[in-house]
Amino acid sequence: MAEIVEGYDDIKIATVCSHSSLQIFHGARKEGFGTLGIAIGSPPRFYDAFPRGKPDEYIILDDYTGILDIADDLIEANAVLIPHGSFVEYLGAKNVLRLGVPMFGNRRVLEWESDRRKQREWLTSAGVRMPSIIDNPKSIDRPVLVKYDGAKGGRGFFIAKDEWDFKIGIDPTQNYMIQEYVMGTRYYLHYFYSPISIEGYRLSKGSLQLLSMDRRDETNIDEIYKLGSMEDLKRLGIFPSFVVTGNVPVVLRESLLPMVFEMGERTVERSIELFGGLIGPFCLETIVTDKLDFVVFEISARIVAGTNPFIGGSPYAELIEPDLSTGIRIAREIRNAKGAGRLAEIIS
């Protein structure tokens, strides 16, 4: 992939038209790149309402697996693909790994991110605290959260307090993990790791940035308590849903920021040891307890939709550079790497 991209005359930033693509295209345009949107069926009409986030051109497919068949076309277009949550979920982690087109970041991270057990091995071996795991549903003796593999935007996740709760909620056809339900406040921390930058918060190689934070609006779980007890609602066939519908900007109390950077640092340093490094944007999905401890319940090893409120910058990004977004930061990294002759270090 590095050899292919080194032969590009004029890089185009490409991604699937979903998730955070408006921000990605906007950032690419701000940094002087052409853009290419991959859409299903027809170009999304609502993109016409946002000309600064609309791609310069489209490739239209019948379904997402068709991306595998247009690798040569994308290479001919000088495309560098930017993965995001919908891209990975719709195409599938295994297909992304074998897709023969240059991609920003280290795609080997998908082997560790998409499997919750490997993800847990990565983070706990980095010294990051995670919720405890319950291996047997018969052992559920406290509130737990049951989660399926993959990036599903919270779809299908559910809370159980005993084996009965588990049995009425589980889809046995999917791989799942039962983890302790940690009480506290949720914060989604948006980082950017650059292996080529030497400015800012230095790591053993490169540097780490904190660009923004959000919380998630999740369909009925945030409002269902108004209808009565969870047990009564389940007996009526009403179940809490964690499907994400939107994102809310937040700012953390400043005294917690040292822990935020320590967690990010340990996560990146361990990734370098395990699979050559986590490159570019990633998100630690955390809970802060009333003891002011962080518990990380998941990592998203790519741009997350929670960065979308910050296309014009965030309170944290503003302290780095005015109007800096994650989309701009991705395009900036590609531009800087190309200028320094170091594209091979950020492309896979």
Image (spheres, grey):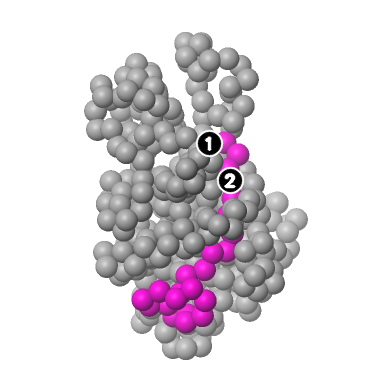
Mark 1 — residue? 243
From this view, report whether residue 70 is shown above or below residue 342.
above
Whole-Å distance between the Cαs marked 2 and 1? 13 Å
Compared with 122, 317 (above or below) is below
Cβ atoms under marks 2 and 1 closer than 8 Å: no
Query: Viewed as shown, does residue 133 lie left or right of 187?
Result: left
SS state under label 1? loop
Image coordinates for residue 268, horizontal then vertical, percent: 38, 65
Q: Which residue is mark 2?
A: 215
The residue at 43%/36% (across/down) is 182
Residue at the image point whose x is 34% and y is 16% from the top: 164
Q: Is residue 298 left or right of residue 311?
A: left
User: Mark 2 is on which residue type?
Assistant: Arg
Hey, what amino acid is under mark 1?
A: Val
Q: Which numbered disc, 2 or 1, marks the residue that appears first in the sequence?
A: 2
Picture quarter with the N terminus: bottom left
261 or 26, which is in the foreground? 261
For residue 90, above or below residue 341: above
Q: Looking at the picture, how far across and down is residue 82, in whole percent?
A: 49, 65
Q: Which residues are magenta?
A: 195-218
Residue located at (39% from left, 22% from top) = 161
Q: Residues within 10 Å of mark 1 (few under 14, many from 20)?
A: some
